[in-house]
Amino acid sequence: MIITTKTYQEINRKIKSKDAIVVTAEEMIKIVEENGSKVAAEEIDVVTTGTFGPMCSSGAFLNFGHSDPPIKFEHLWLNEVHAYHGNAAVDCYIGVTRMADKRPFEYGGGNVIEELVAGKPIRLRGISNTTDCYPLGEIDTYFTIDDLNQSILCNPRNAYQRYVCAVNSTDRTLYTYMGKLLPNFGNAHYAGSGCLNPLTNDPDYETIGIGTRIFLGGGIGYVMGEGTQHNPKNRFGTLFLKGDLKQMRSEYLKGVNYEQYGTSMFCGVGIPIPILNEGLAKKTAIKDKDIITDIVDYGTPRRDRPTIRKTNYEELKSGLIEINGKKIKCSSLSSLYHARQIAKELKEWIEDGKFFLNPPAETLPIETDFKPMKQVSELKFVKDLKRGAVICYEDCDIDIVAEKIVQKNTNHIVITDRDQYLKGIVTSFDVTKAVAKKKTILKDIITKRVITTTDNEPADVAARKMRKHEISALPVIDDKNKVVGIITSEELM
């Protein structure tokens, strides 16, 4: 079979003369369905893609120019967000996940970049270890993006090829980078634009590589190489991107703040895929139902979280997924509307002869091994430190509870029913107060809203729970809410 072939030069000549046939990835699906991949390869010159969602590994290099007298920053803050100073004297890097010192969880580096691109004034406060050539010790001023010499968006890991779908099996709300996950599979979150996603349309990196010109944040950007945690073997490829912030628009760079998790930034990325052969025509016609990913339980705070089952982007985009026969509301952290706008805008740039394609100087690796962090010390889990819980039933008298506290030399009594299902907890202080107030019924002193842990929770996570809630013990429960032990501050110490 003869495969139709085009070159970048031929496509760019057609773009220059405004004769190029350009479609979005969603439009390409219908074209291939109706006409086949061979005809599509002959007729279509470029397929445009787009994604718009949280891209935490993003940031910007800024150069302020020299002050008079000069200063060499040791520390500096932009709108009270600590920026990295370890470059030249008046260069910095601000990351989108860095939170403001005085407003954590409410404002961060992503918000600074959005406001900078929008033309708003940014407060610069810096301090220095003075030297003979940099005698100024402190500065406090304001600037806008037009005052900067360079403002370079530099994103080490963007445009994930796909994402998992996150759920929560525990009985408490989890606050994660995948958003707020409600207890007992109360909701599900995913990210990415599915069939519009850039790397989904060129999964073997035939056209995406070092130097590829792209849509980035509303302006023109470039691929610098593979992103950090690039994992193409498992279809989790990523890209390292850069572009000039002065060309970009705040419409496509949005600071975002996740409740009780932190800050990030939504970033718009669109990549044109030149249809050089029939194989690329087939790949750019991929459907949402063919993009497979996992539903993962974030209730287990470990790297190898358990997979509930497989799903696909067609099911995810429907707004409902099914787990154990139960329909669960599913929503995206990404904006499909903005992804479509990006693909459409990039299409218009190319059709108008304003955007040309360039072959990569080097293609990206497709055999990269993805490795977890090397840890030289053993991580302790709750199951390694827990002990047997002293249990009383919910219909016990207070004097029986008090007797067990003395006999077992403990400060915590876990209250269950006869089948060991957790009902509450009582401390020695609760019993002391009950005696003082002449209370005799156990249910009057039980704490029913109990903070718990599980066997596979890291010990330091359990310790943070105790500090956050100002308590000194956590009942250990299994996945059915049965008590299997207790861990106290004594064990953690």
Image (spheres, rainbow, N blue to C red):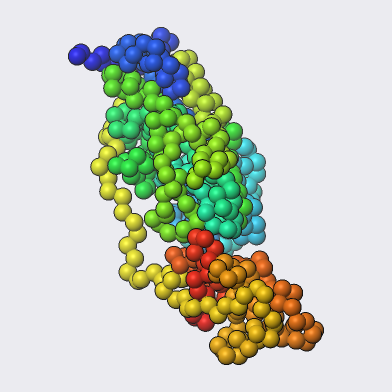
Figure quadrant of the N terminus: top left
Answer left or right for 106 relative to 97: right
| x and y percentages locating residue 321 in the rendered image | 51, 39
| x and y percentages locating residue 210 in the rendered image | 32, 35
As drawn, 125 above or below 318: below
Which residue sits at x=51%, y=30%? Answer: 339
Most foreground residue, 57 or 482:
482
As drawn, 160 above or below 306: above
Q: Is residue 254 visible?
A: yes
As drawn, 271 above or below 69: above
Give the residue furthest to the right. 437
Which residue sits at x=47%, y=52%? Answer: 297
How many tags in the picture?
0
Most foreground residue, 260 or 410:
410
Q: Is residue 469 visible?
A: no
Which residue sits at x=26%, y=16%? Answer: 5
Give the residue furthest to the left. 1
| x and y percentages locating residue 164 in the rendered image | 44, 44
Q: Quadrant of residue 162?
A: top left
| x and y percentages locating residue 459 in the rendered image | 47, 70
Which residue sits at x=51%, y=23%? Answer: 345
Most foreground residue, 342 or 30:
30
Most foreground residue, 429 or 17:
429
